[in-house]
Image (cartoon, grey):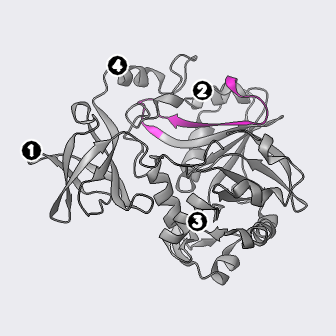
């Protein structure tokens, strides 16, 4: 299967993007450098192309009933113009995918991980009950993420919508520079930010408009590399690393989106059992010495391997190595000392309470 290009491929190349294959798409890992882009998002703003993400539209008389069945959060709590973070689980409690659910006036929009689009679509279609229509518009929609403490100031110059009125996990259907779009107060960085959905043939114009509006304010284009370091500093999980079909939301720290009190949904019985008998949890650990933990590195206690790193990096904000991994319940307390085997070098680390980074502008 050949690599696909997002509508912003030419912009990435013109900006010197270091392109890699991610989820079948050619996307930039970085432009000027991961650390520089990371710091721009933490202090000013960065603009990401995340057009590889999948968008499904769910409509029909039974759409809400269907979504209550296949997702673990409470769909009934949503009003028009609200979004929620959720997940879908198999009957055994393993995670199909984590996703965003948007409630619009006449339908719902699901935003799923790029690597799971086909799997998620097939799974959803296999669970359909009643009057439900599922449309995959992933190829028709482009998605940008403008993230950082000055993101609202930059975006406001392009729209008549009063962005300060959009609360966290709310969205409006408006326009940017005359282009119809969805402006959503969501993100994956821990900073104030917006995600912008528009037709694929309009998204490059919106990108150019935002970059021009932020040129004198310190806005930088940002790649997948710093998207990963930013999300890790917040302990935001990544499907395929920190969560997958072998993990449950309970042990992954997603109990806060798992509404076990709602009517039956796929995986509920397994998750009730998992909650009553938690044997492991996803923890954050910080290196006690100069070292960078990477995915797959063994975690050791008393010369025994007790887990492995699921995600790890050098935190640009903290200038320390950080990682995540699943550990037995008795090893998950803050202050627990561990050893990480980094390619044969045994390095000390300590379990800490998440998140790693606590100075974000998320709720500004």
Q: Which mark is residue 40?
A: 3
Say which label, 3 or 2, has the lower sequence index: 3
Point out the frontmost of discs 4 and 1. Answer: 1
Distance from label 1 to label 3 (Cα)?
41 Å
Q: Which mark is residue 105?
A: none
Name the residue that disc number 2 marks.
Answer: 69
Distance from label 4 to label 1 (Cα)?
28 Å
Name the residue that disc number 4 marks.
Answer: 276
Residue 23 seen in the current view: no
Q: Give the camera-side residue of 143 and 22.
A: 143
Q: Secondary structure at mark 2?
A: helix
Position of residue 13 relative to residue 140, above or below, is below
Which quadrant does the C terminus fall into? top right
Q: Are marks 3 and 2 in contact (CB under 8 Å)?
A: no
Q: Secondary structure at mark 4?
A: helix
Say which label, 2 or 4, has the lower sequence index: 2
Point out the frontmost of discs 1 and 2. Answer: 1
């Amino acid at each position: 299967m050949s690599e696909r290009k997002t509508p912003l491929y030419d912009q990435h190349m013109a900006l010197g993007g270091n392109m890699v294959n991610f989820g079948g798409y050619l996307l930039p890992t970085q432009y000027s450098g991961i650390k520089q882009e990371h710091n721009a998002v933490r202090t000013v703003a960065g603009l990401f192309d995340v057009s590889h993400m999948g968008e499904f539209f769910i409509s029909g008389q039974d759409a809400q009933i269907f979504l209550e069945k296949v997702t673990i959060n409470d769909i009934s709590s949503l009003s028009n113009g609200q979004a929620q973070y959720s997940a879908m689980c198999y009957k055994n409690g393993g995670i199909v995918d984590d996703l965003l659910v948007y409630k619009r006036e006449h339908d719902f929009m699901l935003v799923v991980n790029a690597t799971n689009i086909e799997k998620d679509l097939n799974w959803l279609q296999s669970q359909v009950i009643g009057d439900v229509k599922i449309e995959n518009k992933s190829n028709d929609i482009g998605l940008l993420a403008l993230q950082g403490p000055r993101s609202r100031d930059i975006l406001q110059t392009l729209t008549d919508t009063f962005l300060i009125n959009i609360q966290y996990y709310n969205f409006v259907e408006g326009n940017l520079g005359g282009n119809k779009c969805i402006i959503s107060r969501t993100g994956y960085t821990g900073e104030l930010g917006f995600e912008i959905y528009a037709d694929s043939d309009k998204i490059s114009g919106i990108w150019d408009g935002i970059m021009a509006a932020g040129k004198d304010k310190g806005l930088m284009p940002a790649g997948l590399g710093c998207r990963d370091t930013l999300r890790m500093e917040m302990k935001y999980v990544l499907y395929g690393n920190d969560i997958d079909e072998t993990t449950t939301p309970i042990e992954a720290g997603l109990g806060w989106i798992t509404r076990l009190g709602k009517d039956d949904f796929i995986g509920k019985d397994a998750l009730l059992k998992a909650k009553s008998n938690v044997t492991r949890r996803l923890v954050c650990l910080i290196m006690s010495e100069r070292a960078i933990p990477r995915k797959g590195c063994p975690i050791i206690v008393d010369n025994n391997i007790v887990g492995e790193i699921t995600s790890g990096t050098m935190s640009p904000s903290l200038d320390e190595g950080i990682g995540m991994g699943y550990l037995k319940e008795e090893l998950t307390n803050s202050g627990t000392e561990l050893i990480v085997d980094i390619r044969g070098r045994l390095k000390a680390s300590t379990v800490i309470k998440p998140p790693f980074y606590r100075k974000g502008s998320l709720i500004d």
